[in-house]
Amino acid sequence: MAVYHLNHLRQLEAESVFVIREVAAQFERPSLLFSGGKDSIVMLHLARKAFWPARLPFPLLHIDTGHNFQETLDYRDQLVESIGARLVVGSVQESIDKGRAVEEQGYNASRNVLQTVTLLDTIEEHKFDVCLGGGRRDEEKARAKERFFSHRDEFGQWDPKNQRPELWNLFNGRKRQGEHFRVFPLSNWTEMDVWQYILQENIEMPSLYFSHDRDVFVRDGVILAYSPIMKLKDSEKVVNMHVRFRTIGDMTCTGATVSNANTLEDIISEVAASRVTERGGRFDDKRSDAAMEDRKKEGYF
Amino acid sequence: MSTETKGYLDMELLRFTTAGSVDDGKSTLIGRLLYDTKSIFEDQYDAIKKASEQRGEEGVNLALLTDGLRAEREQGITIDVAYRYFATPKRKFIIADTPGHIQYTRNMVTGASTANLAIILVDARKGVIEQTRRHAFIASLLKIPHLVICVNKMDLVDYSQEVYENIQRDFKNFSSKLEVFDIRFIPISALMGDNVVDKSDRMPWYKGLALLDMLEAIHISSDENMVDCRFPVQYVIRPYSDEFHDYRGYAGRIAGGIFKPGDKVMVLPSGFTSRIASIDTFDGPVDEAFPPMSVTIRLEDEIDISRGDMIVRENNLPSVSQDFDVIICWMNEKKLVPGGKYFIRHTTREARCIVRELRYKVDINTLHRNEEDKSIGLNDIARISLRTTQPFFFDKYRINRNTGSVILVDEATNETVGAGMIV
């Protein structure tokens, strides 16, 4: 007798595809937040599966901090072209030039927080009523209570104490004029699931995830990539190291790890053996115990 | 690919919910499962250790792992369902951890709606109490296929077989009134780790499995309905490209039964019949599709089909009606209005409905039906009769959770106010 059973990756895939199709069906103007990181790459892959053989029925939205790794931008442009997707870019530099956002000062200045301004402005300009995001509940404790369909008021704010209950697979995307949603199809995926799936599907990844030689410096125990935009303290020295990135965000706040992992199998073994969360290398989360929750309430992803 | 990596790629997924209050040692149990399966990372552990010290608590408070929101940590309470993840080489687990006291029913119903299994914690010193009965009733109402009763704090009753067996007997006496077919019992001490991950040698009289072994072994692949073919159409795919000029596919998730190319099918509500031309996926066509797969079905004939329609087998139809009864769990402070109108969502169909009649309210502690009390507020459970603006295609919830569940949405606030199970 045949065994009717899907392995965990196929189950997660089926759930995510269902959620992405639900977004296309329930909303007028969706967009898919694409950062060039592994989660958004997997989400895009799932979105292509959801609508095949048709093209994506919505554009990708990239919030460009102006401090991205060049490898990320190259990967993005190549991918967009190969799948024939539409790309909308919201520029943090433009928000700063227009006076909508003010650049942080000091050594740990980051444009991570400023992204929120640009994101909300871009959503308004293009009248997006929903953004698909690659957030996962295992990433951070504030995200553990996030819904698949996360309601945001007209200011883009998240009210964690007053979330809509989410039952079975019945997603409620009803909203008033001016309100919008963030939807997280990867809610139930872990970092391990994401890498296993990348391996199973043989998805091409940006070179930053694999071990390479790079000029770096160490700040507060975190290895940061050196670039002319980074302000170094006197005590900090640039050295060349063999590293890779576990998460990819803005250059100013994404830490690297010393690693020899060159293949997806190597990365999976490394993730399995790791005793620190992937966001342990993120400067943006270290600002306070509730840094992520505070940013989310203001309209961050 | 190494065998190790291959193994990782072929795990099963088990979703479970945990019921019990902080006093029952629920957080300790979850903390232990996560900690002993190495699912807590060092930086997470250090962070909660630091936070516990700041709060002046003795030891490391594992509840802080799941109480992620600022307000929760400030008030020392759990507000909302938290989802936690861990894996063993055999299975990946998703825990819906539901808080004990506040808005209990609302949260447990939410967590239970997608669970294959519920763990109910019983304090060995207190035995089966009102709360235990309430948890078991909600689990049976939501038709969670498997129930594991963990008799916790066995260390505080000298690992007594007699205490354990009395609790087991009390629970069985009560649960014979419930519709749960798979109930198991384990004596544990979450604090000491007895029978959680490893079999304890302090209770040689217990011949069963440790909790984690049981979670890995319970047979879950027959939890879905593989008999009654149900395919709610979610989205119509029309590529309008040169290559796929005439392509018209119906995308959705199999809600029940097994579909195959060549099957003779009927489309509801039109009643037109056709055959399945192919079942497509991005990775190529498949020979069979079953729950919970997301696929795209093409039919041999051109029929007008849109979102909310349902593809079924001609000789096995769901109920088709605008009138049905549901057991409703009320999820909102704003009370249910008899005679009131709501949006209603069922599979991929949305309509409006009117609450025609409030039949009775259920006392979740005694299971007594109260026909006099007409006030249904937050956390209340009742049986109501609905009429919808268009026909729904449904099964009884006990036959199929996918096609037997509805949510009610408030027309003014758009909030999800009720969770209904069709009877």
Image (spheres, coloured by chain):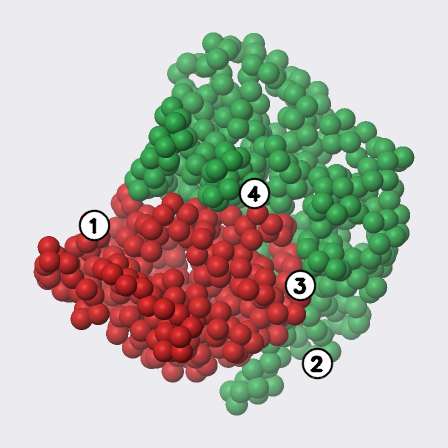
Evaluate if marks 2 and 4 touch, with contact meaning CB atoms under 8 Å apart. Answer: no
Same chain for labels 4 and 3? Say yes or no. Answer: no
Chain letter belonging to callout 3: A
User: What's the colour of chain A in the image?
Assistant: red
The numbered disc on residue B80 is: 4
Evaluate if marks 3 and 1 touch, with contact meaning CB atoms under 8 Å apart. Answer: no
Coordinates of residue B48 in the picture (x, y in percent): 37, 36
The numbered disc on residue A174 is: 3
Which of discs 2 and 1 lies nearer the camera? The answer is 1
Amino acid type at circle 1 is: Asp
User: What's the colour of chain B in the image?
Assistant: green
**Identity of the residue drawn at 68% across and 30% down:** B134
Same chain for labels 2 and 4? Say yes or no. Answer: yes
The numbered disc on residue B302 is: 2
**Identity of the residue drawn at 66% across and 31% down:** B136
Q: Name the residue under label 1.
A: A220
